């Protein structure tokens, strides 16, 4: 008897769609899928990928195109990802407490599906490296030529810590509410002050955790209904206030305008993470709340919701493998004797669709191979 993986997968997605609880906030799932999609597209399309001294580098065109940094205030999506994570972890921790389970049960459930794709990724890459070094002793290793494949994974480390701290941060939210958010914001501001005024660079690493804790904590206010109860004028006021703060602080000369690393800037707002990303989290959360009613109605369509469900079912597989897919395309181009452009010329912009389609085709094959690892039932 012949079987087909695609129909089976479609059947599973249909079952999940049919089983969607009436009270589920579909918008949360949409934002999670959107966050992963934006990260992938940014790395593939908005990077001037090239070889320098035998190493793959991925500078972006922001430093070469005037005002393009403005896009990063929307497309630097990691604050929104942690905001949604706060909602999801709040819901999961509440359910854990309701069922009289403990922190270990919570951590196992939340991290199991997150790390299964990562373990598969590490095993495949380790096997590949071992084979290549055996076949070719002169093989330099991926950490020499393609370390960029692994760089995006640092977010998983931060997200793991933030998730494990959920029992503490959720308690802080329940007991002091907005004061807890204010305390985190103050700690972030003080850490930046110490870093930039007194040269204490280690505070930048501290802020790389505190800023994402702040975004995660902000998600609790979505989960408990605080943000959705605010009238649209109030949400718009928060949006304008956050936007004004971003304009002021990035115009101060201390922080770059871009929310991603730009080679010509002396520092990056993303790592070590600065207070700008915390302000960006407020801006993106307010924007998300403003457009929520419209998008929520759109998500009631079965075809749209099915797409979101399918995307979330392979989200971590996509995240951990998308840079490997890009590397495969780059190596194929090299084997064909073709050269990648090193400047954002007109030709570079014309090529952008290729850098979405080609890695996308490779990634689709990887999803077919590895998605079962992510989708395996959690015990």
Image (spheres, helix red, strand yellow):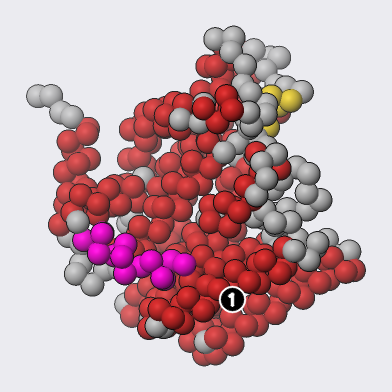
Q: Residue at x 31, y 69 (%)?
A: 293
Q: Is residue 182 above or below residue 248?
A: below
Q: Is residue 25 visible?
A: yes
Is there any visible trace of residue 143 in the rendered image? no
Please indicate whether residue 352 sits to the left or right of residue 250 in the image.
left
Q: Nearer the viewer, residue 361 or 20?
A: 361
| 297 inside magenta stretch | yes
| Magenta stretch, main secondary structure class | helix
**Residue 218 versus residue 74 in the image, above or below:** below
Among the 4 quarters of the image, the one containing residue 135: top right
The magenta segment: 287-300
Assess whether residue 113 is covered by the magenta stretch. Answer: no
- Quadrant where the C terminus sits is bottom left
Q: Nearer the viewer, residue 113 or 346?
A: 346
Q: How many marks?
A: 1
- Residue furthest left as drawn: 1
Q: Position of residue 193 (x, y in %)?
A: 81, 72
Residue 199 is situated, as x and y percent measured from the top left of the image, at 89, 64
Q: Which residue is mark 1?
A: 241
Residue shown at 46%/57% (left/top)? 111
Left or right side of 372 for 46: right
List x then y, in percent, for residue 152. 59, 45
Q: Identify the residue at horizontal 55%, vertical 61% (top origin).
A: 79
Query: Quick check: 131 left or right of 103?
Result: right
x then y, percent, for residue 236: 47, 75
Local SS, label 1? helix
Q: Residue at x 51, y 65 (%)?
A: 284
Q: Say which quadrant the N terminus sits in.
A: top left
């Amino acid at each position: 008897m012949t079987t087909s993986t695609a129909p089976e997968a479609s059947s599973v997605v249909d079952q999940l769609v049919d089983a969607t609880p009436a009270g589920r906030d579909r918008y949360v799932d949409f934002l999670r899928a959107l966050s992963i999609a934006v990260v992938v597209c940014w790395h593939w399309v908005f990077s001037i990928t090239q070889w320098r001294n035998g190493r793959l580098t991925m500078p972006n065109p922001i430093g070469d195109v005037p005002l393009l940094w403005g896009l990063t205030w929307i497309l630097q999506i990691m604050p929104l990802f942690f905001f949604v994570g706060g909602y999801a972890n709040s819901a999961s921790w509440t359910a854990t407490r309701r069922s009289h389970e403990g922190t270990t049960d919570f951590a196992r459930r939340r991290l199991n599906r997150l790390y299964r794709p990562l373990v598969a990724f590490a095993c495949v890459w380790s096997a590949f490296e071992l084979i290549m070094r055996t076949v070719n002793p002169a093989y330099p290793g991926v950490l020499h030529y393609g370390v960029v494949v692994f760089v995006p994974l640092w977010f998983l480390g931060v997200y793991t810590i933030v998730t494990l701290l959920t029992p503490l941060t959720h308690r802080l939210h329940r007991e002091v509410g907005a004061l807890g958010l204010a305390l985190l914001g103050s700690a972030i501001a003080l850490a930046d002050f110490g870093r930039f005024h007194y040269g204490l660079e280690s505070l930048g690493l501290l802020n790389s955790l505190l800023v994402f804790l702040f975004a995660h904590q902000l998600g609790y206010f979505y989960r408990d209904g605080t943000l959705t109860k605010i009238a649209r004028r109030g949400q718009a006021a928060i949006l304008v206030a956050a936007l004004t703060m971003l304009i002021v602080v990035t115009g101060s000369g201390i922080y770059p305008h871009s929310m991603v690393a730009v080679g010509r800037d002396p520092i990056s707002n993303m790592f070590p993470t600065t207070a700008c990303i915390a302000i960006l989290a407020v801006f993106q959360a307010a924007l998300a709340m403003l457009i929520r009613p419209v998008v929520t109605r759109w998500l009631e369509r079965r075809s749209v919701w099915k797409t979101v469900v399918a995307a979330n079912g392979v989200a971590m597989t996509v995240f951990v493998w998308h840079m490997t897919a890009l590397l495969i395309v780059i190596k194929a181009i090299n084997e064909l004797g073709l050269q990648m452009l090193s400047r954002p010329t007109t030709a570079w912009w014309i090529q952008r669709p290729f850098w979405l389609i080609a890695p996308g085709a490779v990634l689709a094959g990887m999803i077919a191979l590895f998605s079962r690892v992510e989708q395996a039932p959690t015990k």
